[in-house]
Amino acid sequence: MPFEAARRRRRCAVVGLGARARLFTEALAGPYADRLDLVGFCDVNAHRMAVHNEWLAADHPGWEPVPAYAAEDFDLMLRRERVDLVVVCSVDRTHDEYIVRALEAGCDVVTEKPMTTDADRARRILDAQRRTGREVRVAFNYRYNPVHSAIRQCIAAGEIGEIGSVHFEWLLDLRHGADYFRRWHRDKANSGGLMVHKATHHFDLVNWWLGTSPETVFAQGGLFFYGESAGRRRGLARPYARAHGDPAADDDPFAVHLADSPVLRSLYLDAEGEDGYHRDQNVFGPGVSIEDDMAVLVRYASGATLTYHLTAYAPWEGYRVSFNGSSGRLELLVEETTWVRPDVVGSEGSSPVMHGSVADEEAGRTELLLRPFWERPREVKVATGEGGHGG
């Protein structure tokens, strides 16, 4: 993009106004307001768009409401509001529809991860990007975690030589992991499953760390802990479809109570009348078609291999990554929670998920350890700042 064009104010619209969109609307109305104008909202639910406008007005006195458009009027919004940039935060299976239509209208796109849910949709997006020459960026925010940047620097500097293999284990705790089984993500048709919706972060990190691309991939997974049959088998099932208004959910540590959170109440509970979406479904109820335990084996173009495992029902949350090189080993341990309190549901924020850094007595640690051949191991100190996902 020419320098002068890059400096002009750009007109931005957001499609999909769930909880995740708030990260973008707050940024657009705050830190980036000097270069971007927020000119349009688009969603299947008018109530949710009104809630976002109320939040912006409360945080920014004098704020004019952002024009709100129904999902079927997406193309009209692009034309009428002269949109340059579209931020896509809708249900994953709809990403390709909005991305392609935005590109064909001459817009650039920033999309929440995953870019899309299957290979055919990915090809459709890539074809549209090549055809239009516009830009698509996927919000892989984990690249900006300081410890992840430090890993890339260590590998690029040759601290452990040529990389032969990577071992990567990711654990979602009983609070965070369960949340994917309460909401629309539980249906693989919507999200592609956690291998797509969640692990896409992790595969992107390995590609970036190693500076290479996968050539051969084997994967398998299953529904081991959540879902109707597992709940009955282990005595965890409760007789409710959704938690709100059902006494059977009152003492269920796997339930989320929307009425307890002003944000969740306004964004989801009060919006149900329009689209009937329930944000608080039973994790051991029917309708779960995604896996909760997944394993992957990858060979990269560089010759390196990756073994990866994702568990969505762990007693603590975090991850371990180890790199074996021709002159040493690099090890990362991140404990986001060391355990999970059943009475903490994260009702203060826009999500029922709380990491250990918020629930102080659960907080863990981050350790990056360099183990060169023939030398004592040494810790790589990494400074962190404010914000989530590592600072």
Image (tube, helix red, strand yellow):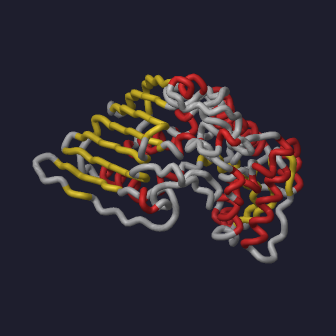
Measuring 42% from the left and 46% from the top, which residue is drawn there?
316
- Where in the figure is residue 50, as x and y percent of width and height? 83, 58
Q: Is residue 13 left or right of residue 299?
A: right
Left or right: 232 as drawn, with respect to 40: left
Residue 85 in view in this figure:
yes
Image vertical order of residue 245 relative to residue 221, above or below: below
The x, y position of residue 11, in whole percent, is: 76, 61
**Is residue 132 among the parts visible in the rendering?**
no
Question: In the rendered image, which quarter contains the N terminus?
Answer: bottom right
Please name whichever residue, 119 or 65, is drawn nearer the observer in this view of the structure.
65
The residue under the point 89% across, 55% down is 80
Instruction: Classify residue 204 as left or right of residue 280.
Output: left
The single residue placed furthest to the bottom in the displayed view is: 61
- Give residue 93's quadrant in the image: top right
- Hey, which residue is sitting farthest left in the picture? 374
Q: Is residue 305 above or below residue 172?
A: above
Q: Nearer the viewer, residue 228 or 119?
A: 228
| Nearer to me, 140 or 213 | 140
Residue ID at (52%, 33%): 195
Say which quarter of the image contains residue 297. top left
Q: Position of residue 189 (x, y in %)?
A: 67, 28
Q: How many marks?
A: 0
Q: Position of residue 284 (x, y in %)?
A: 60, 31
Q: Quadrant of residue 90?
A: top right
